[in-house]
Image (cartoon, rainbow, N blue to C red):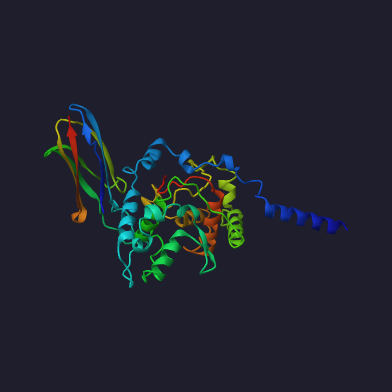
Amino acid sequence: MRAFRIAAWLLVASTHAWAQPPATDIPLAERRSGYEQMKRETRAMQDDDTSNPATFWVLEGESAWKRKTGAANRACSECHGDAAVSMKGVAARYPAHDAKSGRVINLEQRINACRIERQQAKPLAYESRELLALTTYVARQSRGLPIAVAPDQKTRPHLDAGRATYHRKIGQIDLSCAQCHDQHAGRHLAGNPIPQAHPTGYPIYRLEWQGVGSLQRRLRNCMSGLRAEPYEYGSQELVDLEYYLMWRARGMQVETPAVRP
Amino acid sequence: MSNALVTVPKTAKKGEIIEIRTLVSHNMETGYRRTERGVPIPRDIVRTFSCTYNGVEIFSAELRPAISANPYISFYTVATETGMIAFHWKGDNGFSVSSSAHITVT
């Protein structure tokens, strides 16, 4: 009887945990973009497009957007027109459900799917200059808009998978994302402030990289830092984690292309 | 597509101190790094930057391997006359980029 009671309690507790975010989650009103923890000089870099080196990627993306490519000899702009209109708000709702594959895909995968299906071109490699440029250009069109990832019945499993990854201890260091970015955000790790890890400005220009990189590159960085084997670029685990992080940052403003130390 | 971004005020009063900001797209490969296989990566950097105001050089700089990628250079000058402010970057492997901006001085 006692065992049954404990089991019943555990069941209640676990369904409760399922429905409610864990108690360690940062309250919505207390979320802060990593921008606010940056030095004045780094913030100034981001604030002015002419001092933000990511502008070069945006300009390259704009050229790529208008360039005919693939066997179909078709440019992005021929279907989508002016990106300032057609791509406005798109990055704010990605990763998103893809009806064809039946799973959640991120912006890079969306761009590559379009290349394969519509342009009959080869997909661009992850972290290649052209894919980063196109992604940055598309995401730039959502700057200032609130992140609007809204899970539904179809995408809920991806959100839960991402959340599980976020809370899973990994690597020889044996830490989860949540332990640093929820429980110790604002404190310091090796002299650097720990951000709350809201992916508001990706792809970002990271000073450490001396270039633009994707959210997945950043996630893999963290995993290497924990001495864990990072998931592969484009793996569903990383896409689900991206999805969870964007949901966690829902309502926050898109800053793309952001500058980060 | 542009490889350089320059910010110069479109108009200024004669004698006014104006800020000029420049950014150029370049990897600034130091020459001190190696590939994963241990092969040294040759140096490839921007070597010089110069700025001319109606043909007269008003600012120049020598760049070194320690300068980060996509070098940002900002400086001040006095607006003396209406005309063209031109910028020129030169570097390893024949790297050469130019840009210019017009300024109206009243």
Name the residue at the left extreme: B55
Residue A229 visible, this angle: no
Spot occupied by residue A224 in the image (x, y as percentages of width and height): 49, 56
Residue B41 visible, this angle: yes
**Image: B62 above or below A239:** above
Spot occupied by residue A196 in the image (x, y as percentages of width and height): 53, 45
Q: In terms of depth relative to the viewer, which is nearer, A172 or A11?
A: A11
Q: In terms of depth relative to the viewer, which is nearer, A60 or B91?
A: A60
Q: Quadrant of residue A213?
A: bottom left
Residue under the image location 31 percent in, 60 percent down: A66
Q: From the image, which quarter does the C terminus of chain B lie in?
A: top left
**Image: A138 above or below A193:** below
Spot occupied by residue A78 in the image (x, y as percentages of width and height): 34, 63
Residue under the image location 80 percent in, 58 percent down: A7
Q: In terms of depth relative to the viewer, which is nearer, A167 or A75?
A: A75
Residue under the image location 58 percent in, 56 percent down: A151
